[in-house]
Image (cartoon, rainbow, N blue to C red):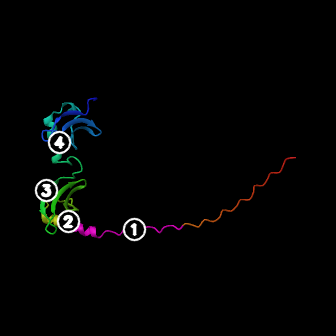
């Protein structure tokens, strides 16, 4: 662990050094400003130049792989007749739905996602756009409370003295 980050060798294209190390988010390979994850900690000590170059090239080709990519479409239906955006059947957290641009519409429970056609999808999306337009207006904020003007504090009467014992 004291020998990390380990220098693997110069990159074949530009001659800059490729390093392997163990970072905050796990094992990695680094070249210039590109960081690629390694699958196991043992790979930090065993990864060779060819594998490191391949990992870095893969990372540069697909920089956001593995995070925040969203669901893959089950079926592409084609372009929307009105907007021209692609219409796709997706599988979501709450079941299958149809997506076109930023508009999502649920597929009814009785219908299979494989049976949805472009015409069905356009009808579902149009129905959903109609529902989104009839959104309730936001509640008005409460009127700000008026602050009372400060009144001068009344002076307390001096405490009564207790009678002395005889």
Name the residue located 23 percent from the left edge and 67 percent from the top edge.
129
Nearest to the eye among marks 3 and 4: give it.
Answer: 4
Nearest to the eye among marks 4 and 2: give it.
Answer: 4
Query: CA gap, disc 4 to disc 2?
Result: 41 Å
The reply to whether callout 1 and callout 4 are in contact (CB within 8 Å) is no
User: Which numbered circle lies on residue 125?
Assistant: 2
Q: Is residue 66 above or below residue 149?
A: above
Rendered image quadrant of residue 153: bottom right
Query: CA gap, disc 3 to disc 4?
Result: 32 Å
Nearest to the eye among marks 2 and 1: give it.
Answer: 1
Query: CA gap, disc 1 to disc 4?
Result: 52 Å
The magenta region covers 125-146
Give the percent coordinates (x, y) of residue 145.
51, 67
Mark 3 lies on a secondary structure that is: strand
Give the residue pinned by disc 4.
56
Q: Is residue 114 visible?
A: no
Query: CA gap, disc 3 to disc 2?
Result: 16 Å
The reply to whether callout 3 and callout 2 are in contact (CB within 8 Å) is no
Mark 2 lies on a secondary structure that is: helix
Rendered image quadrant of residue 157: bottom right
Q: Which is more N-terminal, label 4 or label 1? A: 4
Mark 4 lies on a secondary structure that is: helix
User: Which numbered circle lies on residue 75?
Assistant: 3
Name the residue located 21 percent from the left edge and 46 percent from the top edge.
66
Q: Quadrant of the N terminus?
A: top left
């Amino acid at each position: 662990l004291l020998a990390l980050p380990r220098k693997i060798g110069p990159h074949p294209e530009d001659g800059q050094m490729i390093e392997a190390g163990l970072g905050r988010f796990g094992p990695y390979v680094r070249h210039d400003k590109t960081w690629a994850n390694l699958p196991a900690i043992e790979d930090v000590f065993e990864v060779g130049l060819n594998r490191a170059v391949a990992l870095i090239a893969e990372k540069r080709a697909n920089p956001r792989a593995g995070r925040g990519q969203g669901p893959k479409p089950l079926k592409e239906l084609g372009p929307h007749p009105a907007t021209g955006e692609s219409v796709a059947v997706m599988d979501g957290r709450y079941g299958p739905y149809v997506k076109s641009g930023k508009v999502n519409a649920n597929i009814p429970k009785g219908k299979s996602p494989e049976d949805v056609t472009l015409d069905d999808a356009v009808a579902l999306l149009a129905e959903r756009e109609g529902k989104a337009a009839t959104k309730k207006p936001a509640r008005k904020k409460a009127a700000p409370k008026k602050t009372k003007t400060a009144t001068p504090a009344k002076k307390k009467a001096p405490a009564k003295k207790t009678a002395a014992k005889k």
